[in-house]
Amino acid sequence: MVTARQHAEAGRDRLASALIANGSLQPDWFAAYHAVPRHLFVPDTVWPGQADGVRQGRAVSRLEDPAGWWRAVYADVPLTTQWDDGVLPVHNGRGSSPSSSSSMPTMVFSMLGALDVADGHRVLEIGTGTGWNAALLSHRLGSANVTTVEVDRNTAADARHRLARAGYAPTAVVGDGAAGHPPGAPFDRVIATCSVRQLPPAWIEQCRPGAVILAPWGPEYGGEAIARLTVGQEGGARGRFVHSSAFMRMRAQRTTRPNSLAYLSAPWPADGVRSTTALSPDRLGDWAAMFAIGVRTPGVFPLTERYRDGSYTLWLHDTAVTSWATADWEPGRAEFEVVQSGPRRLWDEVESAWRWWDALGRPGFERFVLTVSPDGTQTVEPDRPGVRPGGPTGRGPR
């Protein structure tokens, strides 16, 4: 019989090899990786996901399937650890919306590498989760230099227990991560393990000039990437996106997304105006395309209604519940029917945004820059020379 220790050693070595091979685990994090095993920070029941961080599989229990649990823990995948903020019962082995996880190890170490910490740095972590990331930081910098904030009391309590069992005691705060932790300021580094669409001002205010903020950022429409910003001498922050990501949204920045019926004032097509387009809705689903579209169309989000014959309808809604649009995709078509209603012509906005991105050469995340000015104004723009997309055509959500 294979013992738990043998499972752990084999799994850790195998995962380390994979992380070194893909470049995410750098030499300066080797010691922390080996000193802080992931399995100490994983609960007994998890839902292994895919590398994109979006789809979750079936529950794996340490008690019922120990071999499967060990495989999941040391696989390079995210592990969902909580559904629906822990307030709803789990039905048929899973909930409706994942709300906490142990992030994909490649993402964990890629972000720690991008954080570029040095001895003596004070770090603020937003989103304690299982506590693994806080433990890695504590091993590298010392617990006294790490502050971690978690909004969920039960998740925070479990993380504190795991951290103490592993021998680490960072400052662990229960509260809204958007507020940071003023008593611990000023910080040299801020790292968020939840995504935002507006960088909280408190994170910048609680940093020293020259500090680095690393945070997943994504517009309402979709698409997301890790922003690495440097805090300016006069306030504000600016930096590039370093790679794509798929994190759960910070609770304070979640928005309610009504279904399509909330937008219709009468039976279909209500007061919608029909037209056609040569732009296939299929061309809008790329993660980078969604990011670029979202930068140009604040407050717009998509939903997809699929049919048995393989066709589908792309619905576009605005968060203010004033406007909607549909675009029908059918195989073999060169033109697609569009219906739009409301003061915003959402399909026109989205198509215009896609064509803007296409005309720039379809730049990836790394070509975009996030700027937060001292007065809190936020812009996202491509770095192409001569292009100034701030203002009416390039301003991100505010």
Image (cartoon, helix red, strand yellow):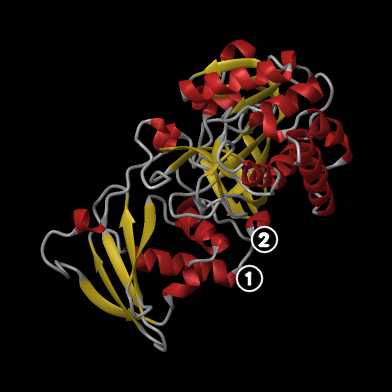
Residue of label 1: 361
Q: How crowded is mark 1: few (under 14 residues within 10 Å), some or many (20 or more)?
A: few
Q: Looking at this rendering, what residue extends furthest in the left direction? A: 266
Vertical placement of 346 versus 313: above or below?
above
Residue in view at x 43 percent, y 49 percent: 220
Q: Looking at this rendering, what residue extends furthest in the right direction? A: 27
Alpha carbon separation for disc pair 2 and 1: 10 Å
The one nearer the camera, 140 or 55, is: 55
- Locate residue 94: give its quadrant: top left
Residue 384 in the image, given as x and y percentages of width and height: 67, 61
Q: Residue type at mark 1: give it.
A: Gly
Q: What element carries label 1?
A: loop
Q: Residue type at mark 2: give it.
A: Arg
Vertical placement of 218 versus 303: above or below?
above
The one nearer the camera, 360 or 31, is: 31
Report the disc number at residue 384. 2
Question: In which quadrant of the rendered image does the C terminus lie?
Answer: top left
State yes or no: discs 2 and 1 in contact (Cβ < 8 Å). yes
Residue in view at x 80 percent, y 25 percent: 140
